[in-house]
Image (cartoon, rainbow, N blue to C red):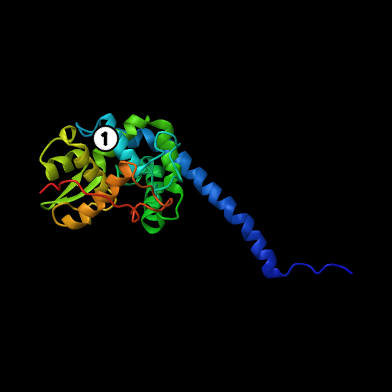
Amino acid sequence: MTEAAPSAPARFRKKWLLVLPACLLLYLAIVGCWAWAAFDEAIETAPVAADAPLTARQVAILTRVEDPAFFDHAGVSLGKGQGFATISGAVARDLYLDGADFTGGKGSLQTLYRALFHCCKRIDLGRDVMAVVVNARLSKERQLALYAGRVYMGTWRTQQLRGLGQAALSYFNKPLAATTDDEFIGLAAMIKAPNQFNPVSHRDLYLARVARVRALVLGECRPAGWFDTALAQCSGKPPGDPG
């Protein structure tokens, strides 16, 4: 008795099970080649704030909160508490998607990748490939400087704040280098949602968030998983707020 030939729908599904992964790999390969070729142009326009360099303690706090495996990964990470983006991924977004407009073929692909990011950033792997390229082309120290100098820190008196230095001056009235550990923990705690955790307009939410992040930094709790950036299970005593 001969086996029945697969039905047309079954053959169609089998075909697409082969085609879709191949298309995804091709897409990611094109992203990687584009990111590598466009890197020099992207980095030329990348500003670094004068106070972007961080102390060793500030680096330890920032990476513990935002990217626990930063010094070990190659641009992407699945570490607990990591969430969707690494520091390398945030730098890649600023360089390639939010930075200068490219021209020609690079510009056309940039327009496409911007659209894909804004549409589907939670599932698009393109930025992860860009993060791998950034990690291969930039030292970890330069990545931290770019991140610290450009990370969005909310709105202060109608002004959008960019970088930890601007945030320290606005919220604590002091340069970044002069902030205490608790103040810097407050800045790191805000990064997840800086307007929601604004220390002036949403002080209660800010203090609750800082208490959880402080407990994390002090080793009193751990993230529950990869997506646990809220640290809901953490609790602790908040430091004094900026007033």
The spot of residue 235 in percent (x, y) is 29, 52
**In the picture shown, does residue 13 fall above or below 188?**
below
Type of the residue with mark 1: Gln
Between 5 and 186, the one lying in front of the other is 186
Query: For this rendering, which residue is in front, 53 or 206?
Result: 206
Q: Residue furthest right?
A: 1
In what quadrant of the picture does the N terminus appear? Answer: bottom right
Depicted 134 relative to depicted 152: above or below: above
Percent of width and height locating residue 108: 39, 48
Q: Is residue 173 above or below residue 113?
A: above
Q: Residues within 10 Å of mark 1 (few under 14, many from 20)?
A: some
Question: Can see residue 94?
Answer: no
Quarter assignment of residue 75: top left
**Nearer the observer, 73 or 222:** 222
- Residue 63 in percent (x, y) is at 34, 39
Which residue matches tag 1? 58
Q: Is residue 124 visible?
A: yes
Q: Can you tell which quarter of the image residue 162 is in?
A: top left
